[in-house]
Image: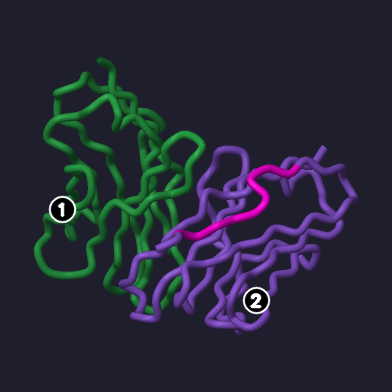
Chain colours: A green, B purple
């Protein structure tokens, strides 16, 4: 069965420091991996995706994510956090045979000034 | 380009009543999806339309939920009769017909509260 795990309910980081939001997945076949962000009172916004190729993908707002096949992980990273990055982050996976997105439970990122 | 639009943004109804949620996808997007997030848990898939056809409705919880997409444009999700456990945020999303690698774009969601 397909699943996504986001082991941290919340991540706290100081502004200017690097941040990592963790995600591991389980899926049959080649995975398509996505990160979405939800700001307060807003919908889900697409950040980035991994389909194939380079394991490091870059996305919106300076975020990037690293695909690690052996560890079945797709951690979201940013070199220098901003207070405005504070939001709820969702990792999602899609099997190559399905349009259905399987989401993790979300990680709340708090960036303190 | 307008994004995915959902109406209403909030709805409070009594148990046993009927509620209809509406989603207008991005123009030209053949794929339309419904998801929901209940009680702060993970976002779960409900169903997938390709144009007006239901491609996958494996996530629909029971027959109190009915989704339609007349003419392959906007979609409605009706809950009848609503139960307390139906409370949550219902998201609609759409994507182009370029395969499963294409990202889906989400609306702002409808927060449904059943009391």
Measured as percent of width and height from the top left, residue B105 is found at 42, 61
Cα distance between the residues tagged 2 and 1: 35 Å
Q: Secondary structure at mark 1?
A: strand
Residue lying at 51% horizontally and 54% vertically, measured from the top left: B107
Picture quadrant where residue A94 is located: bottom left
Name the mark on residue A36: none
Q: Quadrant of the N terminus of chain A?
A: bottom left
**How many numbered tags mark residues here?**
2
Chain of the residue where label 1 is placed in the rendered structure: A
Q: Which segment is the magenta one?
A: B3-11
Name the mark on residue A58: 1
Front tag of 2 and 1: 2
| Camera-nearest residue between B30 and A74 | B30
Q: Quadrant of the C terminus of chain A?
A: top left
Asked if residue B17 lies left or right of residue B27, the reply is right
In the orientation shown, which residue stands out farthest toward the left?
A54
In the orientation shown, which residue stands out farthest toward the right?
B16
Q: Secondary structure at mark 2?
A: loop
Asked if both marks, 2 and 1, belong to the same chain, the answer given is: no
Depicted B30 relative to depicted A6: above or below: below
Measured as percent of width and height from the top left, residue A73 is found at 24, 52
Is B29 inside the magenta-drawn segment?
no
Q: What residue does disc 2 label?
A: B69
> Dot 1: within a 10 Å radius of its alpha carbon, few (fewer than 14), some, or many (20 or more) residues?
some
Residue lying at 17% horizontally and 55% vertically, measured from the top left: A68
Picture quadrant where residue B88 is located: top right
Residue lying at 70% horizontally and 45% vertically, measured from the top left: B112
| Camera-nearest residue between A51 and A43 | A43
């Amino acid at each position: 069965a397909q699943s996504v795990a986001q082991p941290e309910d919340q991540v706290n980081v100081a502004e200017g420091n690097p941040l990592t939001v963790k995600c591991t997945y389980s899926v049959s076949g080649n995975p398509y991996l996505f990160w979405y962000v939800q700001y307060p009172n807003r919908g889900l916004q697409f950040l980035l995706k991994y389909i194939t190729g380079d394991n490091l993908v870059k996305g919106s707002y300076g975020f990037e994510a690293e695909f690690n096949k052996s560890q079945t992980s797709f951690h979201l990273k940013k070199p220098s956090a901003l207070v405005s990055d504070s939001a709820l982050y969702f990792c999602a996976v899609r099997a190559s045979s399905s349009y259905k997105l399987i989401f993790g439970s979300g990680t709340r990122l708090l960036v303190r000034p | 380009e307008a994004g995915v639009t959902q109406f209403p943004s909030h709805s409070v109804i009594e148990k046993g009543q009927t509620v209809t949620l509406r989603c207008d996808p991005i123009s030209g997007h053949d794929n339309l999806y419904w998801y929901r997030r209940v009680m702060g848990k993970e976002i779960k898939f409900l169903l997938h339309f390709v144009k007006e056809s239901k491609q996958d409705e494996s996530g629909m919880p029971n027959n109190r939920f009915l989704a339609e997409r007349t003419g392959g444009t906007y979609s409605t999700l009706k809950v009848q009769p609503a139960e307390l456990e139906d409370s949550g945020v219902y998201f609609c999303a759409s994507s182009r017909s370029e395969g499963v690698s294409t990202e889906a774009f989400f609306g702002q969601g409808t927060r449904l509260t059943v009391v």
